[in-house]
Image (cartoon, rainbow, N blue to C red):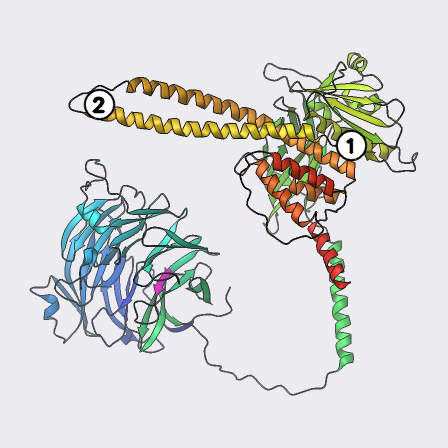
Amino acid sequence: MSLFRVREWWGIKCGVGEEFDRGSLCVGDVDNERTGGDKIVVGSLSGMLRIYKPQKNAYFPTDLLLEKQLEAPILQVEIGKFIPNSKDNALGVLMPRKFAVYTIIKEGTNNGDFLGNDPKESTSNQIEGYSVHLYYEHPLQRLAFNFCYGPFGGAFGKDFVCIQSFDGQLSFYEQDHFTFQRFLSTSLIPGPICYSKSIDCFVTYNSSMEVEAYKYQMLAASSGSNQKEQVNGKKVKATWTVNVGEEVYDIFVGRYSQNVSSGQTEVIVVGEHTLFTIKENGELSSQMRLDYFPAAAELYRTGNDSTQKQKLLLATHNKTLMVYKDPKLIWAAGTSTIPVSVKIGTFAGIKGMIVLLDDEGNLTVNYLGTGAISNPVPTLEAKDVDYEQLEEETKRLQQIIRRTKRNQKDEMVERLIIRAQIPNSVDPESFSANTEHKRVTIKLYLSFTGEDSILENLMLNINVEKPFYVTQPTIYIETLKGGSQITPVIMPITVYGGNDCTPRTLEASITAIYHDPTSQQPKTAFCNFLLPFGLCGSIIPAKKITTHKVTLETNRLPLPMLSLFEDLISHDDIETKNLVSDNILTFQFSNGLDVTVLISKNAGRYRIQSSSFETLFIMSKELIRRLKDCSQVMQKEETTPLKIEFTENIPFYSYFDVIDEHFKNRKGLKVYYEQLDNLAHQFRSIQKRLLIRYKDKNPTSINSLDTLFENTYSEILNTSLKIDKTQSSLKILSHSLSCSTSLILLLIQLNIGLSDNEMEVLENYITPIVNDDIPGWEETVDSALAFLLSTTLTKNPKDKPIEEPEELQNTTKLKKRFALVFDRLHNFKLLPAAEKEQQQVKEKKK
């Protein structure tokens, strides 16, 4: 909101109960008085035409020159050279079924040049001595929407008219006679239209959210149909098209940008959220985001020099008037209403006056700036400062501030509380004809602390990662009563364990979205929890497969296997108990992969081994969590804290094999896409050749084109099947890479002893979230590691931005950077941004 406001110089209310739109206002020398300044022409949707001439800084009855009731609503009024064989101005009035041209003449003047022979209609205003004469009119076959005018086709000293109908028909009139009509094939809903004299083009906006330009000569020479329903004739094609992607309020042609060359113009498009500038050839020059919704706009220049850059005047729905001089906002002032039209004119010899009209007919002439000071600022007498009184006042204010803060803390904050009750094990096995997956039922307790309040339209989103899923991820609750005495609402939620892939995490979350019943502000509430590990699979007979293995060392005595994983075994399930010994357990996931846990009999060592590298992570993470939980239970008996380490070499070779397989699959998919593009191009070329042969009057041999056509089609199908298969394989490999990356990060933390804050920083560079878009995961991580090595993990850090990831041809450089980062992590610390800034400040002080 601006501190300044526009200063009203003149104002009047046009009629009572009438409505006005953006085309209801125009300003100019409508009566050809030459030296008398501009007049304001206003046409309402009730059909009332009024002409004003402001002369002083207040409204007088003599300012109303003419008032005329027309027979139809007035959609748009414009002043131009519409009279044949005359360079004088006339008034063009657009009505739903008619376009009329009127001349405004002051009584007593020689009006023979205007009227010619036998005028069709003459009505005089005897009070002011002005009369309005209908010179000619054009009946319209279709409902009109708007019109534009200008010297179409290079005409000199006269203006032609282009009228756009509601169904996209453009009707062209060379003053008093009709020329032709054309339908725009892209028009579904009419939009703003503007004429560019320098390129002889019509610029308009279509329902596909595109700004397009049509050459006048192309429209005139086109053989397109005059009826939209017919398809005969050549369709009218746009000279250029620019996709703006939003609704367009108005279009102007002028010289607005600072970089526009002399002799050229550009198209200024005022969108719903953006201001676009487009060059004459259809190239998007610039765009600027608007923080408000425009209500009216006008492009103007302060002088008479046609080569001078113009400024843009924008009125907003926030009751603010913005003045732009590309590319900056140079002034903003508040308005008393939301205008639907804004114009610039000269009144009483004052140039640059702003004319505003709102939808209720409040017409004002304004200027920017400030008025004269009515009350002079009094001179204050110099007084001696009483420091004791100031100190007492400061203490009193500080006490008030402390008391207010204390009261705010004591106040109960109204909020939604979500609590989840998670069972230790999965539900009893219950198989049906539709599903064979394990499931767990979670109880949600919902309560609202606000007394005597009711929450409405509460939405719950349940988020679980693959392979887990819920049948209803979004739940809507119509009402929830609040209060401390109200029993919480219990809502059961069933989570199923799928068999798509190996789980990467057991973390799940519930997000609630609601509106505060008092302030109606949107709020959210969260609840995070862990799913039972038994949802991932089941225990099977022990296997000793050592393809991939990880050994975790602790400073405690080993715990029995049954006590660590007691939730996986039911008390009544004797068969499963027999599968578990004191030091070995094999767990099979729902997708068929398995992992084995071995416990040392003497030392506190735990080995996790499997034939699949990706399965090691979820079991390692779960084992660490269970060891920490047991340590907290036994905290009274143990004096030293639990310490978990990984002292072996990081299994980079196994990890790099996963990266290579994923990278190879990505490259193969790219090759298949290129092959499919080439085959599709070849297929279209063969189709064109066959069509040409079939259309020939004298049939010729197709020279085995049909065989080539069938073979190409067959290759397209085979390549599509390969792409589908490779995409499915890439999805599996991406998940495997995600689990493997999480495992490597976990082992690095245990090996080096990184803190949780340092791990958070490292995960920002080596992300376990695998993205197969462009750029891919390998390119993104390679660029991030290069930045990390040159800034944080070096003795001489450099300040430089992260470069755009470049496409990799192989993973050799990425592997070297992985190893280099691991080596340097032993000597350098990864500090979060906040701690890093604090350390730099301390070093500067020293």
What residue did someone put label 1 on? 625
| Residue in view at x 85 percent, y 32 percent | 554
Residue nearest the observer in this picture, 799 or 297 = 799
| Residue in view at x 12 percent, y 71 percent | 111
| Residue in view at x 36 percent, y 18 percent | 711
* Marker count (numbered): 2
What residue did someone put label 2 on? 694
| Residue 243 colored in magenta in the image | no
> Farthest top residue?
575
Residue nearest the observer in this picture, 760 or 723 = 723
What amino acid is labelled 1 in the image?
A: Arg
Q: Quadrant of the C terminus?
A: bottom right
Q: CA distance from mark 2 to mark 1?
A: 73 Å
Front position among marks 2 and 1: 2
Overall secondary structure of the magenta stretch?
loop
Rendered image quadrant of residue 470: top right
| Residue in view at x 84 percent, y 20 percent | 583
